[in-house]
Image: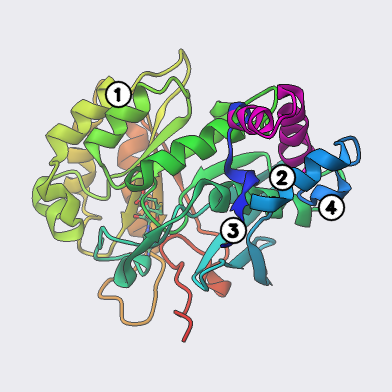
Amino acid sequence: MSHQNLAGLLPAELEDLALSLGASRYRGRQLATWMYRKGVLDLDAMSDLPKEFRAALATDWEAAAPDVERVTPSQDGSRKLVFRLADGSRVSAVVMPDDERITLCLSTQVGCGYACAFCLTGTMGLERNLEAHEIVGQLLVANALLDEGQRVTHLVFMGMGEPLANYAALVKSLRIITDAKLGLGYSPRRVTVSTVGLVSGIDRLGREDLKVNLAISLHAASDEVRERLMPINRSWNLAALMDAVRRYPLAPRQRVFFEYVLLADVNDSADEAHRLVKLLRGIRAKVNLIPFNDWDGAAFQRPPLARILGFQAILLDAGITTTVRWSKGEDIGAACGQLKEPIPA
Ligand code: SAH
């Protein structure tokens, strides 16, 4: 039987494991410190762990991150990391440096089951959920690839897959990533979970007391348009989605992010922008407009620049913070909605 992976266990679970192997809880805390705080995954390198404890661990457990199959640098400074998982499936993560920020975009599933019409990942269908160690592993690997003294500063769960559809592994990885004492110690304010709009998942996440940022893939301000783009809108329409957003607990200056992919002549009209202003009334919102990133066989186009800026201007005039996200890594297939790796033979 293959070994189970320590790098997806919560610090408390590592303590329990140590106890069950006849060691003290303290040994579990040391394990957490090595893996999550120091980024060391080699049991042999964990020099202050007793030999017998390491041997007992090694019977059923290993500490490992997913294998990096390829690192592709983009002209804009971002890098796409393609991971090959133990079962041969592939997922990717994107490292995006920007001034003093280094943002990592993480995947949570192999493929995605939500089939948004404009998204390349959506054409794959869902293959499987990632395990917590495969999610945390993407971050451990990204940090290890950076220069000495550098580390990822911000995390966005916006890679392949729908994070809230892999709820247990998502929350586990979030706890490991945000645990300030024995985990990776990321402030939850630097972590953003993006969703197609799974209302039940948004409510559940709000009750976890994780305090991470919520991003909603909105992409339309009327049900008629959204339904055409996103099948999920038939399960939860805009009214239900916006109610869930209003229920999501926010810290005093925290805002909800809304992603809006701009598709020429589909959702980029001035009318749709005015509807969006109305929809967001009373919500502490920040809108990210994402000009459509093209892929082979896509049935959509990016609007002309003037149209993009015109849409933005309507939101800005209404007092809504709105940025245009010129995607990173377009030249290497790493931009929003472009993540797809060939399925191995
Ligand atoms: N499933 C989650 C996480 C993925 S986030 C979610 O949908 O929120 C990836 C973001 O990129 C989503 O907002 C998605 O709608 C957007 N996107 C997908 N395809 C795109 C494309 N071709 N161009 C621009 N943005 C795209």
**Of circles 1 and 2, which is in front?**
2
Q: Are marks 4 and 1 in contact (CB under 8 Å)?
A: no
Residue at 66% in and 56% down = 65
Which sits earlier in the primary sequence, circle 2 or circle 3?
2
- Identity of the residue furthest to the right in this view: 47
Residue at the spot 67% in from the left edge and 39% down from the top edge:
153
Residue on which disc 4 sits: 147
Q: Earlier in the sequence, mark 4 or mark 3?
A: 3
The main secondary structure of the magenta stretch is helix
**Residue 112 falls in image quadrant:** bottom left
Count of marks, rendered view: 4
Report the Cα–Cα distance between label 3 and label 1. Answer: 30 Å
Q: Horizontal and vertical percent for residue 18?
A: 69, 31
Q: Where is mark 1, residue-wise?
A: 283
Q: Quadrant of ligand 1?
A: bottom left
In percent of width and height, residue 283 lies at 29, 23
**Res. 258 image quadrant:** top left
Q: Which amino acid does the dot numbered 4 rest on?
A: Asp
Q: Which residues are magenta?
A: 13-39
- Would you place residue 274 above or below residue 206 in this image? below
Which circle, 2 or 4, is nearer the viewer?
2
Residue at 14% over, 59% down: 228
Q: Earlier in the sequence, mark 3 or mark 1?
A: 3
Q: Which residue is mark 3?
A: 94
Q: Is residue 30 left or right of residue 297?
A: right
Q: Alpha carbon of mark 4 to alpha carbon of mark 1: how far?
A: 40 Å
Check residue 194 for magenta coloring: no
User: In the rendered view, does 128 fall on the left or right side of 57?
Assistant: left
